[in-house]
Image (cartoon, rainbow, N blue to C red):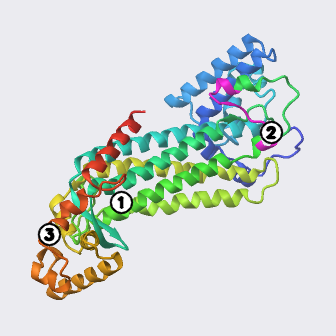
Amino acid sequence: MKLWGGRFTKETNQLVHNFNASISFDQKFYQQDIKGSIAHVTMLAKQGILTEAEKEQIVTGLTAIQSEIETGTLEIDGTYEDIHSFVESHLIARIGEVGKKLHTGRSRNDQVALDMKLYTRDEVTEVDHLLKGLLFVLHRMMKEHTTTYMPGFTHLQKAQPITFAHHLGAYFEMFKRDRSRLSDIYERMNFCPLGSGALAGTTYDLDRDYSASLLGFTGPTLNSMDSVADRDYLIEFLSALSIIMMHLSRFCEEIILWNSNEYQFIELDDSYSTGSSIMPQKKNPDIAELVRGKTGRVYGALTSLLTTMKGLPLAYNKDMQEDKELSFDAIDTVKGCIALFTGMIDTMRVNKDIMENSAKKGFTNATDAADYLVKHGVPFRDAHGIVGQLVLFCIDKGISLDEMSLEEYQAISPVFQEDIYEAISLVTCVEKRLTVGAPSKVAMEQVIAKNEAYLAE
């Protein structure tokens, strides 16, 4: 059954039907479609457009259809054009003429706009929940690693010593911002398009505020044309998902490096690794690599929808049906990636000693040697040059700054005294960085306390 056809004299060509139909993918939001319909008829009864008895018949029929879909008793039939026609046809078949009143004062345009918004709103909440779970794991790990020293990098070269807690904290901040973006999207999108009709509202005396309240919206949308033509909220959501994936991908790139034989900073659990079909020694970080790879897939959905929307005149156009398949795929991809990533880092082993030994090499304490000179009256630019000479000397000798004798130090600058060794020790380099956001244990514990409060909200 189609919800239209009175002005047509021929059946739709089967290829045209297949090309036009959306039920293969929009069946995904049958719950939202039924929820919106129940709110709609409830409002119609309140306004006296339907009787209470008619409303009860329709609601009972819709509730039974949803229950049977969920239990598998009723299978969604792909011969229908979309989920809306499937639900309405089955409703009419069950309760007769009263079922035909379901669509009073409503168009498929505002119906699908509502369904997509309800579905997206639910998914925003679900992704936020998954991110919060990831943050709890990061928070636990940060508390465990405030004195796990490691090198910090710039340009993939060792730069200055930090702690693993500090490094994890950088990602904690990223995912916090991701949750903030989701909150903004939820607030901005939370206005109800139901009652906008095809594009110009309706002559029925609808109470759109009441419909919106039944569905948990802040209120109704204020322009019926924009209501059916708007997909900004979905573009924003795909953008936020793309940023989430970018953050996950960066983290995965580091995990892949850290898990390598060259680094050995961490070891992934067997349950989150795979082997090679030919090389028995291999233990591959496939989950991290797949998350990194699937990032491009999510970017593609965002680019696709932006491209689809860029040339559309108001109001609704069939092009907008293309908002669903790629978006559904992107949402499912991101949720799967967050869940797998969370399990992967929650179970990985951190090799503290290897991290610390790596931090002791590579001259990560060179900046502190320069600061030592500055504190003894040497201008920073001169101190920078002196430490550069120290590094050259160490490279030539194949030693570290810690291994230089005091005589070797003083041969380059007489300012150096015995206390230089304490000044450039790994613990000193990290623990004297006490400013807000720095890697010292004191500074990190302040941040961890703030994170604790944040997660308790």
Q: Is residue 272 left or right of residue 220?
A: left
Is residue 7 covered in magenta? Answer: no
Q: 80 or 245, which lies in front?
A: 245
Residue 216 coordinates in the image, percent (x, y): 62, 28
Mark 2 to mark 3 CA distance (whole Å): 70 Å
Residue 252 coordinates in the image, percent (x, y): 37, 60
Q: In this view, does 1 lie to the left or right of 68?
A: right
Q: Give the range drawn in magenta.
A: 212-226
Q: Residues within 10 Å of mark 2 (few under 14, many from 20)?
A: few
Q: Name the residue under label 2.
A: 223
Residue 65 coordinates in the image, percent (x, y): 60, 26
Residue 332 visible in the displayed image? yes
Q: What residue is shown at x 56% (from left), y 30% (from top)?
A: 74
Numbered label tally: 3
Q: Which amino acid does label 1 sit on?
A: Ala
Residue 363 sits in quarter:
bottom left
